[in-house]
Image (cartoon, helix red, strand yellow):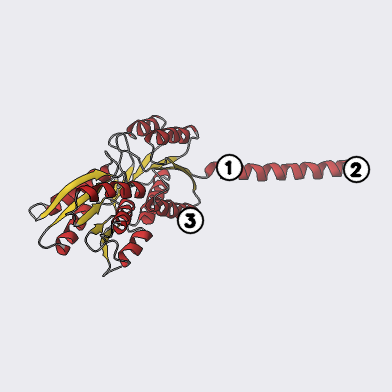
Amino acid sequence: MKKFLTILLIGLAISSTIFANGQKEADAKDDTITIGFAVSTLSNDFFVMMKDGGDAKASELGIEIVTLDAQDSSEKQANQVSDLINKKVDLIILNPVDSDACITSVYAANDAGIPVITVTRMSNDGEVVQHLDIDNKEAGALIAEQMIKDFPNGCKVAVLEGIPGASSTNDRSEGFVVGTKGTAIEIVVSLSANYSREEGATVMEDILQGHPELEAVYAHNDEMALGAARAIYAAGLTDQIKVYGVDAVDDAIAAIRANEMQATVQQQPGLQMGMAIQSAFDYLNGKTVESRINIPLKLLTKDNI
């Protein structure tokens, strides 16, 4: 009988320990912050660098991050944000495909009581805790300043625009237009290539056929600039046409070194997302965060890479 009671007590002790340990693990899991990152596309190196920077910061802070790639589809992104809301993530970091199309998603997160932080592109309405970005007008102005130096007597330039309606597209256009106002730099054509390298190449091929006088290309991001540079190289016009971009992705740096691009603007996407994760962590722990953070910019040319 004593032996039976001893075994029973040992069994109860083990069961209690297992239950307590399981409860601790469950409590720890419940305390883990889960952040959803709805990104416009991971086919662009810029956003891959952004994701990597966010993952590193999340690991440092013990945060779980769920990344969903919209593949540049506003409809797909809306569905993905709905999934994040249904999963009851603690906060959503949103990189909108389109600044207008994302408004419904921001409203839905607001209604669900899930805070939203936007990166790179803002939402044109809805409640957002913080927006992290560069000054996109400044990016356009920096390219304008460099182009004026490279072409003191003016030039004919083509502009490859980003996604229509995106705040970055509008601001990078405005910064460049204002920066070249009153100079002999003339925009002869301005077309969207949707921030895509392949579309940049295709659009550039068409532009080259219609504008043989072209001397420069300003692309709103490096992906389009690299596509344009490829088309220009294929046409044997690399020495005639200078290409400028924004983002400073690795391929663009290599293209500048190879004289296939003239300049780009560095905006540190990994730092931007790392700061967004830190802001999310602080906000969810009751701290006040700034409503807007601008990431410092730097113009890169062959001379200062």
Taking depth in this image into account, of 13 and 298 the one nearest to the observer is 298
CA separation in Å, label 2 and label 1:
37 Å
Residue 246 image-quadrant placement: bottom left
Q: Secondary structure at mark 2?
A: helix
> Which mark lies nearer to you, 3 or 2?
3
Taking depth in this image into account, of 127 and 255 the one nearest to the observer is 255
What type is the residue that disc 3 sits on? Answer: Glu
Q: Secondary structure at mark 1?
A: helix
> Which mark lies nearer to you, 1 or 3?
3
Q: Report the residue marked by disc 1.
A: 27
Numbered label attached to residue 155: none
First in sequence, mark 3 or 2: give its number.
2
Q: Position of residue 191 (x, y in %)?
A: 24, 44
Against 160, residue 301 (above or below) is below
What type is the residue that disc 1 sits on? Answer: Asp
Residue located 66% across and 46% down the image: 21
> Which mark lies nearer to you, 2 or 1?
1
Q: Report the residue marked by disc 3.
A: 60
- Whether residues under marks 2 and 1 lie with C-beta atoms below 8 angstroms apart, the answer is no
What type is the residue that disc 2 sits on? Answer: Lys
Q: Report the residue marked by disc 2.
A: 2
Other residues around mark 2 within 10 Å, as few (<14) / some (14–19) / many (≥20): few
